[in-house]
Image (cartoon, grey):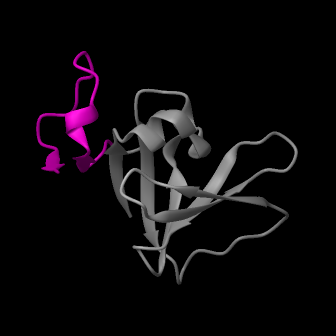
Amino acid sequence: MRVSVCHCLACQRRTGSVFGAQARFAGEPVSVNGNASEYIRVGDEGSHARFRFCPNCGSTVYYTVEELPGVVVIPVGAFAEPAFPEPAFSVYEERMHKWVGLPAAIEHMA
């Protein structure tokens, strides 16, 4: 598992927040049960992500990104766990709101 923070405009719109926090897992050990609705979103750079969300409440349960084959992404908020590990890296920081603070040891990716 690798936890990240994304500041891209697509993540800001999707989450209704100033960034999206996500945990990425290798797809093999992840199993999905139950019903989910699907929505395909085109990101800032043109990549396609398939979002699966709860058909009852609309919460994003998980998603996959075409540029990351074999990876399942789960929004950190879906875990409802305040002690969840802090992010290891941050992307699209040029779009980060100036008042957002990140952990000091985080990896910064363009």
Spot occupied by residue 88 in the image (x, y as percentages of width and height) = 24, 50
Q: Quadrant of the N terminus?
A: bottom left
Judged left or right of residue 95, residue 20 is right
Please say whether residue 105 is one of the residues in the magenta stretch. Answer: yes
Query: Which residue is found at the position 12% from the left and 34% from the top?
Result: 104
Helix, strand or loop for the magenta stretch, by majority = loop
Query: Which residue is found at the position 26% from the left and 48% from the top?
Result: 91
Judged left or right of residue 61, residue 81 is left
The magenta segment is 86-110
Tell me the quarter of the picture where residue 80 sits.
top right
Please say whether residue 9 is one of the residues in the magenta stretch. Answer: no
The vertical placement of 75 against 64, above or below, is above
The vertical placement of 69 against 74, above or below, is below
Query: Which residue is found at the position 58% from the left and 74% from the top?
Result: 30
**In the foreground, 37 or 23:** 37
Spot occupied by residue 9 in the image (x, y as percentages of width and height) = 41, 38
Tell me the quarter of the picture where residue 33 sits.
bottom right
